[in-house]
Image (cartoon, grey):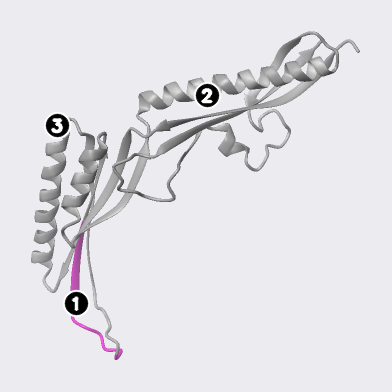
Amino acid sequence: MSEVVVTVRGESEARVRAEEAAVRVTVSTDGPSRGPVIEGAQVRASSVQDGLVAHLRSGEVSEWSSARVSVWSDRPWNSDGAQLPLVHHASVELSATFTDAGALSWWLGDVTESDDVQVTAVEWRLSPATRVRVESDVAAAAVHVAVERAGAYAGALGLASVSPVEIADAGLLGARPEPTAPLSARFAAASDSSGPSFSLQPPEIVVRSVVEGRFRAE
């Protein structure tokens, strides 16, 4: 046996404590008069914004925005099937990125004391710089695993050395990618928690890389 081609897969993952939390809240008001409803939403949203500005100045928030305002009206129906008078609604959506879990917990406790503020999402994540570094490290480790596996196969066949022919994300070396390949090929991140959480303890983020490689064994 002079030469064979060995195809292997290498996987690696790292668990890193989340550093940021992207949070979204919605301020909503309703009532029989359009003007007071809109004014009430604006006043409450301004109060929430003031808190975010204070956290931004202290460095506990890296960015915030108020991107969406909605105003609409409807005529609800009662249990007897009768249409009730017109009700006006107004909502303002705000988002912010917190870099301090303690500040986030305090802020959430403060804004949710009001019935017209609803927390719609809290997403834990890594900072951009940390994500780039961890993804690079995990990718390199996955390639190292693939090289070790190719060497093990070559040794089992009585061959002395291996040299790389192709390295790619999972699924790209085959004629048809596997159904799960797009997720594995990218650096998939997942929180250990089952849903949004307001805990003071940020969850671990899982950064995973899967590669496939072809090696020439001699």
Give the quadrant of residue 203: top left
Q: Earlier in the sequence, mark 2 or mark 1?
A: 1
Give the CA separation, mark 3 to mark 2: 34 Å
Q: Please state which of residues 27 and 112 is positioned toward the viewer in this rendering.
A: 112
Is 90 one of the magenta-colored residues? yes
Measuring from the top left, give residue 134's x and y in whole percent.
45, 24
Can you say whether 100 is above or below 32 in the image? Answer: above
Q: Which residue is mark 1?
A: 86
Which label was assigned to residue 138?
Answer: 2
Residue type at the position of mark 2: Val
Residue 166 can be seen, yes or no: no
Look at the numbered disc 1 and give the secondary structure of its residue: loop
**Element type at marker 3?**
helix
Residue under the image location 28 percent in, 42 percent down: 200
Q: Is residue 215 left or right of residue 80?
A: right
Task: Find the distance from the CA under tag 1 to the CA under tag 3.
Answer: 44 Å
> Helix, strand, or loop for circle 2?
helix
Q: Is residue 198 above or below residue 55?
A: below
Q: Quadrant of the N terminus?
A: top right
Report the residue marked by disc 3: 58
For the residue carrying disc 2, how many other residues have a C-alpha within 10 Å: few (<14), some (14-19), or many (20+)? many
Residue type at mark 1 is Leu
